[in-house]
Image (cartoon, rainbow, N blue to C red):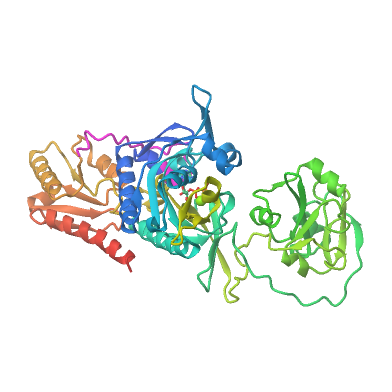
């Protein structure tokens, strides 16, 4: 490709709307352009990177027996009614009507469609396991589309659905996919960490998210300093150490605390640490109102709380509900004497002695609270966010914190969808049983953004060679000079013929402009044709990521570049097979 022909509109300025590096660089390098909030066009360079990611995914999915299909984006409402998700999916689903007033949605995911296909086409255990996948656009009306293609409303996903005869085979399928995901992300040059996660609304009982580690990541994870435990904080568990009993249990005492509502306020007022407070937050889920109790230095985990009460979601109660159950405005709830709602306490709360909490009256707190003596929760269960510094359940390590971008997720679904849609198979005895399912997604467009987030420097993107839109950029310092032009053209021709993906910067621009663009776009190898080296029959080779730079004879440059590209791709592939 000739740079003069390439539609790669690079930008010098950082676009104001882009907050994080990957979004800024993808715009600046001319990979993407915005069409609407969360909706993007991929320009030629962006599309080339996407195709490389898809190529790696296809390779690995096919290698484990995945069969590629293409499912409809436009999906009939009836199927979603059958599983109950037409209503459950909520505002994120794009719903529409056809001219005859029949309901459709733009697929946010494809469990329904795939299960309905398999219900009609698969009969016997002999056809199992079955792995069907596709790479296609998904539509989700995200509340906060942001960070460019990282959180889009239209985005590209690879989704695979596995169908097995029993739990044991599902377990095998699950780990086959898990390991395939590890290979996919390493081949994309991404540093990822699989973490345990909460299955949430999709159902099922086991799931891992693949997190590309990055400061800009929206997900918080913790991992143990000693064992391999790693989890999304929504799911993470930790160890609650026991405490020595206090010498003296104080009596309950009401204290007037005008204006003090937060844990910070109370720390100052009582001159006691946050770990002596019992934070009482009122949540609701439908008609259920629940007081969630955590220690003052801990944070309620709404996902765990929802699980504890058997709901999908909980939200903080409004002022009116709080007043109704506690008799006080927000900020003064406490477990002592609380009668009009359920009380769920985190285990760490039960270790508080002579604690402090709200008095269920305006401007009143109570001190000298001893759980068990002064109140008895209905349930004592882990409802808090694990946080860095907590002890790991292994007993040896301390949890460390990190941020990540969720680039993929694998789920054991079980029979939730096969049962709802009646997708069964006949076993050896001819008995009809529901298919046991798993589902496995990769955000293809998000993976591209995650790679840019991990692989860039002040000058631009540093593509791993496996994903680079072109592997080499030839830069003649002055294209108007006959000798440079002739050499560059010859080299361009020879590299193309050798199967190397190459761009020739044949523009009539100053060398500085060409170098800047090459660095911004992030071609892994730049070959400069300049007068001095040329006089010695040489060209200058420079590697974008390492900055390695050397002169090489023009006779050897093609073989050299070709060999190093092949070797570096092979090295990664080999490494991830071990
Ligand atoms: P998130 O928690 O980030 O909203 P999710 O858990 O809802 O994602 P899944 O249903 O697990 O997403 O989808 C599979 C993969 O698709 C995700 O791991 C992610 O890489 C990608 N993905 C999900 N939502 C988006 C989005 N709005 N934009 C781009 N990629 C997305
Ligand atoms: Mg997910």
Q: The magenta stretch spans which residues?
A: 1-24
Q: Quadrant of residue 427?
A: bottom left
Left or right of 65? Residue 275 is right
Query: Residue 178 appears at what percent x and percent y?
Result: 43, 61
Q: Residue at x 48, y 37 (%)?
A: 153
User: Measured along the vertical axis of the image, is residue 317 above or below residue 577?
Assistant: above
Left or right of 468? Residue 215 is right
Q: Quadrant of residue 344?
A: bottom right
Instruction: Please indicate, yes or no, whether residue 442 appears anywhere in the rendered image.
Output: yes
Q: How many marks?
A: 0
Q: Residue at x 53, y 71 (%)?
A: 225
Hey, which residue is sitting farthest top in the picture? 99
User: Measured along the vertical axis of the image, is residue 291 above or below residue 138?
Assistant: below
Asked whether 441 or 426 is in front, the reply is 426
Q: Quadrant of residue 386?
A: bottom right
The dominant secondary structure in magenta is loop
Instruction: Please indicate, yes or no, whether residue 463 appears anywhere in the rendered image.
Output: no
Is 13 contained in the magenta span? yes
In which quadrant will I find the N terminus?
top left
Left or right of 321? Residue 233 is left
In which quadrant will I find the C terminus?
bottom left
Asked whether 213 or 476 is in front, the reply is 213
Query: Residue 452 appears at what percent x and percent y?
Result: 39, 49
Query: Residue 171 appears at what percent x and percent y?
Result: 47, 63
Query: Residue 388 appears at what percent x and percent y?
Result: 59, 64
Q: Residue at x 45, y 56 (%)?
A: 426
Hey, which residue is sitting farthest front in the picture? 429
Is 12 contained in the magenta span? yes
Asked whether 69 or 296 is in front, the reply is 69
């Amino acid at each position: 490709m000739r740079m003069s022909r390439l539609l790669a509109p690079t930008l010098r300025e950082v676009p104001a709307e882009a907050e994080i590096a990957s979004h800024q660089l993808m715009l600046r390098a001319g990979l993407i352009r915005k069409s609407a909030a969360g909706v993007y066009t991929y320009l030629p360079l962006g599309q080339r990177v996407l195709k490389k990611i898809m190529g790696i995914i296809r390779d690995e999915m096919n290698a484990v027996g995945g069969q590629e299909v293409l499912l409809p984006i436009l999906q009939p409402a009836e199927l979603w009614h059958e599983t109950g998700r037409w209503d459950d999916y909520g505002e994120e689903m794009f719903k529409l009507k056809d001219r005859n007033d029949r309901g459709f949605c733009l697929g946010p995911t494809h469990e329904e469609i795939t299960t309905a296909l398999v219900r009609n086409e698969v009969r016997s255990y002999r056809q199992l396991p079955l792995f069907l996948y596709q790479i296609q656009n998904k539509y989700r009306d995200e509340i906060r589309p942001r960070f460019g293609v990282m959180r889009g409303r239209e985005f590209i996903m690879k989704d695979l659905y596995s169908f097995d005869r029993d739990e044991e085979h599902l377990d095998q399928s699950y780990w086959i996919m898990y390991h395939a995901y590890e290979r996919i992300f390493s081949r994309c040059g991404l540093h990822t960490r699989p973490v345990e996660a909460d299955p949430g609304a999709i159902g099922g009982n086991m799931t891992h998210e693949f997190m590309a580690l990055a400061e800009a990541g929206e997900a918080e994870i913790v991992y143990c300093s000693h064992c391999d435990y790693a989890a999304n904080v929504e799911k993470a568990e930790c160890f609650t150490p026991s405490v020595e009993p206090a010498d003296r249990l104080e009596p309950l005492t009401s204290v007037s605390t005008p204006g003090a509502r937060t844990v910070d306020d109370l720390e100052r007022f009582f001159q006691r640490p946050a770990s002596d407070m019992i934070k009482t937050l009122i949540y609701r889920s439908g008609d259920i109102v629940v007081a969630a109790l955590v220690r003052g230095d801990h944070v309620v985990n709404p996902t765990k709380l929802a699980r504890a009460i058997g709901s999908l979601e909980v939200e903080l109660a409004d002022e009116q509900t709080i007043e109704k159950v506690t008799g006080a405005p927000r900020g003064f709830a406490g477990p002592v004497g609380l009668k009009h709602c359920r009380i769920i306490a985190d285990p760490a709360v039960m270790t508080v002695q002579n604690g402090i909490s709200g008095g269920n009256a305006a401007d009143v707190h109570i001190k000298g609270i001893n759980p068990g003596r002064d109140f008895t929760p209905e349930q004592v269960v882990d409802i808090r966010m694990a946080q860095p510094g907590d002890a790991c359940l292994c007993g040896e390590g301390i949890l460390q914190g990190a941020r990540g971008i969720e680039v993929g997720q694998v789920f054991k679904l079980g029979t939730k969808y096969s049962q709802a849609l009646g997708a069964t198979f006949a076993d050896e005895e001819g008995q009809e049983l529901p298919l046991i399912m798993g589902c496995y997604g990769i955000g293809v467009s998000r993976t591209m953004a995650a790679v840019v987030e991990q692989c860039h420097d002040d000058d631009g993107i540093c593509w791993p060679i496996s994903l680079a839109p072109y592997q080499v950029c030839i830069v003649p310092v002055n294209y108007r000079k006959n000798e440079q032009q002739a050499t560059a053209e010859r080299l361009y021709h020879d590299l193309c013929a050798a199967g190397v993906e190459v761009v020739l910067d044949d523009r009539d621009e100053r060398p500085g402009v060409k170098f800047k663009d090459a660095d911004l776009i992030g071609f892994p190898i730049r070959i400069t044709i300049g007068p001095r080296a040329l006089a010695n029959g040489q060209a200058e080779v420079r590697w974008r990521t390492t900055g390695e730079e050397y002169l090489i004879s023009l006779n050897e440059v093609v073989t050299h570049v070709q060999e190093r590209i092949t070797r570096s791709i092979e090295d990664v592939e080999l490494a991830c097979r071990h």
